[in-house]
Image (cartoon, helix red, strand yellow):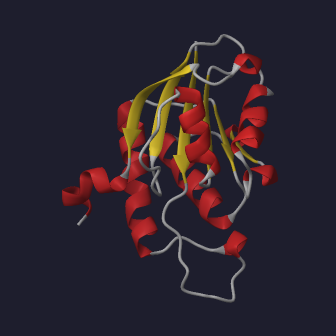
Amino acid sequence: MKRLTLIRHAKSSWKDPTLDDFDRPLNKRGLRDLPKMAERLDESGIMPELILTSDANRAFTTASEIQRQLQLEPEQLQTHPELYASCAKTLMYLLQNQSDHLSNIMLIGHNPALHQLADMLTQSHLEKFPTAAVLHMHLSITQWHELAAGCATSILFDYPKKHASTTA
């Protein structure tokens, strides 16, 4: 059985209108929520063997903090430019082409592709996939190329506003 964790980047800033979307940093809320979400990930026991992330500033910052919190090696974090402005099919293709020796992968990226992929894999409809959200799933596959619609069972869905009283 394989496991997959989808994470949307933490909340980003629109403060500087001259910045390209790709370069937008995290805003105050993102910088506040991210360490707490990374800590909850650590406490949940989710331990990926590999993190695949968009190289957009906000996604890479999110991935780097999670890597630090989980004490993963530098080679366990891979950036993939195609994860920025991608669609669910691109995410699926990237995952289907991962090495079968990996049993637990984390993918950090952007909406709407992450939300669409989550809905496709679980065959359910998440009402939302907010910033810094974590969706951890068990997959009923033994090889990554078998990844397909309906093969996932959601185990954990967490996001900062679920803990609003602890983030204030």
- Residue 79's place in the image compared with 60, above or below, is above
Name the residue rendered at 58%, 19% in the picture: 151
Q: In this view, does 166 lie to the left or right of 44?
A: left
Residue lying farthest left? 165
What is the quadrant of residue 143 in the picture?
A: top right
Residue 11 appears at what percent x and percent y?
A: 48, 65
Of the 4 image quadrants, the one containing the C terminus is bottom left
Name the residue rendered at 72%, 78% in the picture: 20
The residue closer to the viewer here, 60 or 149, is 149
Q: In this view, does 74 lie to the left or right of 118?
A: right
Of the 4 image quadrants, the one containing the N terminus is top right
Residue 23 appears at what percent x and percent y?
A: 69, 73
Q: In this view, does 101 lie to the left or right of 66?
A: right
Residue 50 appears at what percent x and percent y?
A: 66, 34
Name the residue rendered at 72%, 34% in the picture: 92
What is the quadrant of residue 126 in the picture?
A: top left
Residue 69 appears at what percent x and percent y?
A: 47, 47
Is any atom of residue 100 visible in this view?
Answer: no
- Residue 71's place in the image compared with 95, above or below, is below
The residue closer to the viewer here, 12 or 48, is 12
Task: State the count of labels.
Answer: 0
Q: In this view, does 112 lie to the left or right of 161?
A: right
- Residue 48's place in the image compared with 167, above or below, is above
The residue closer to the viewer here, 4 or 140, is 140
Is any atom of residue 154 visible in this view?
Answer: yes
